Image (spheres, rainbow, N blue to C red):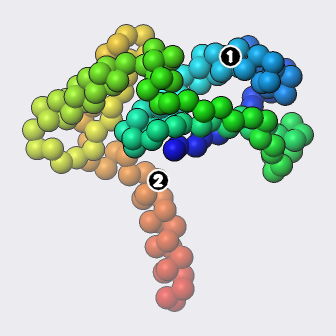
Amino acid sequence: MTIRALNEFDSRAQGSGGALDWRAKLVSQRGAVVATEMKNNSCKLARWTVQSILSKSDVMKIGFVSRVNPRSNDKHVILGVIGWKPRDFANQMNLSLSNGWGIVRTIADMCLKHQGGDGKFVLLKDPNKSILRLYDVPAGSLDEEEEEEDDEDGEDGEENDE
């Protein structure tokens, strides 16, 4: 079994994407709540579903969690739990597993085409087209954070040695 939790988004907040009030609707309109979450969190639910299938889980359960008070982030309550068979849920989401393996194959082929293999790369999806691009990043260009941390550690070490 795999167990996951969705956190309620304040349905009155700007940018809620038409989220329903789980406290009022989860019992009476469970299907509408699930459909809205499939629309607003499709990537997360697809990832969880594929993880459940790959782990050969018989059941995937999703808990619906809400804050006790919207302004307090340390106290939560579980409003309900719904379970599905992962493959049934994938069908309900129109999730194509063969398409997912096709994407993995495409990325693997892109990586294998690069000669040398060593180095750093950035994989980007074009936001307006269904195109993946793999960029070879020059050596040292993504090391700024690591260098800053190293510099700070080095300066502290020098001060302690003197």
Q: How far apart are marks 2 and 1 (CA)?
A: 45 Å
Q: Where is residue 52 in the image (x, y as percent from the top left)?
A: 45, 38
* Helix, strand or loop at mark 1: helix
Between 22 and 144, the residue placed more toward the observer is 22
Q: Position of residue 11 (x, y in %)?
A: 80, 21
| Residue 141 occupies quadrant | top left
Q: Position of residue 122 (x, y in %)?
A: 33, 35
Q: Residue at x 35, y 13 (%)?
A: 130
Q: In this view, does 162 lie above or below 2?
A: below
Whether residue 134 is visible: no
Furthest-left residue in this view:
115
Q: Residue at x 75, y 31 (%)?
A: 8
Q: How many labels does the image show?
A: 2
- Reading the image, the residue beneath label 2 is 145
Amino acid at dot 2: Glu
**Side (left or right) of 111 relative to 87:** left
Comes first in the chain, label 2 or label 1? 1
* Helix, strand or loop at mark 2: helix
Q: Residue at x 22, y 46 (%)?
A: 119
Furthest-bottom residue in this view:
162
Q: In front of the other: label 2 or label 1?
A: 1
Q: In this view, does 135 lie above or below 132?
A: below
Amino acid at dot 1: Gly
Disc 2 crowd rating (10 Å Cα; few below 14, some 14-19, many 20+) is: few
Whether residue 63 is visible: yes
Between 26 and 85, the residue placed more toward the observer is 85
Say the numbered circle drawn on residue 31: 1
Q: In this view, does 5 lie above or below 158?
A: above
**Side (left or right) of 7 relative to 68:** left
Furthest-top residue in this view:
129
Q: Position of residue 67 (x, y in %)?
A: 82, 40
**Side (left or right) of 100 relative to 136:** right
